Image: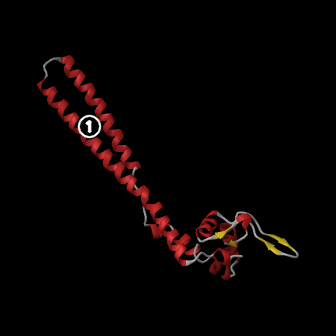
Amino acid sequence: MVKTLEPCPKLFLLAKTMFKDAWTAPLGQAKDVTCSVKHQITEVEKQIEGLLGRIMQASNDAVIDAYEDKIGELEKTKVRLTDSLAYQAPPQGRFEEMLELSLKFLPSPWKLWESGQPELCRTLLRLAFTEGFSYHRIEGAITPKISMPFKALGVLGGGDFRDGAVRED
């Protein structure tokens, strides 16, 4: 049963590429948002400088107070934007480091099973199947439902995992 979960090498490379694309997409978005926020901060700073220049030229106390209030609002906006930059930081670590174990596990679950270590075998069963195995005394093991990563790799590879059983078309 575990051997049927192994995708062909080409299919696994395709899945790895898809994972990598999914990993890098948010990084690009975070860079775009960071660039936009930095541009907004620059614009706010320019507005503050412009208002400070006007304050220097103003002689009316009411006008000066209005400029000071506007500068206070702009300073708060600048602080909010600066704080939002901290939340735009991309996740630390490289793709390979973060998904290394998964990338080793998905193409060869049989190697994990062959190790014979009970902890690893239990982990494999929990990761590869969504339900426990059933056993029929005449037909043998009845396949449980396959987990999403293996189901996706099977469907992409032309396999059919309906009702947990592997069927080739």
Disc 1: which residue: 44
Number of residues whose C-alpha sits closer than 10 Å to that of mark 1, classed few (under 14), some (14–19) or many (20 or more): some
Q: Position of residue 116 (x, y in %)?
A: 69, 81
Examine the image and state in which quarter residue 117 appears. Answer: bottom right
- Where is 130 relative to 53, above or below? below
Q: Secondary structure under badge 1? A: helix
**Where 23 sits versus 125, above or below?**
above
Q: Residue at x 33, y 39 (%)?
A: 79
Q: Amino acid at mark 1?
A: Val
**Spot occupied by residue 95 in the image (x, y as percentages of width and height):** 45, 67
Residue at horizontal 46 percent and vertical 70 percent from the top: 96
Seen at 40% across and 57% down, the residue is: 27
User: Residue 1 versus residue 89: which sits nearer the camera?
Assistant: 1
Is 125 left or right of 107, judged from the image as shown?
right
Q: Which residue is at a point 13% across and 27% down the rendered structure image?
A: 56
Question: In front here: 104 or 79?
Answer: 104
Q: Is residue 50 left or right of residue 148?
A: left
Q: Quadrant of residue 119?
A: bottom right
For the N terminus, give its image quadrant: bottom right
- Residue 46 appears left or right of 32: left
Decide which of 50, 107 is in the foreground and name it: 107
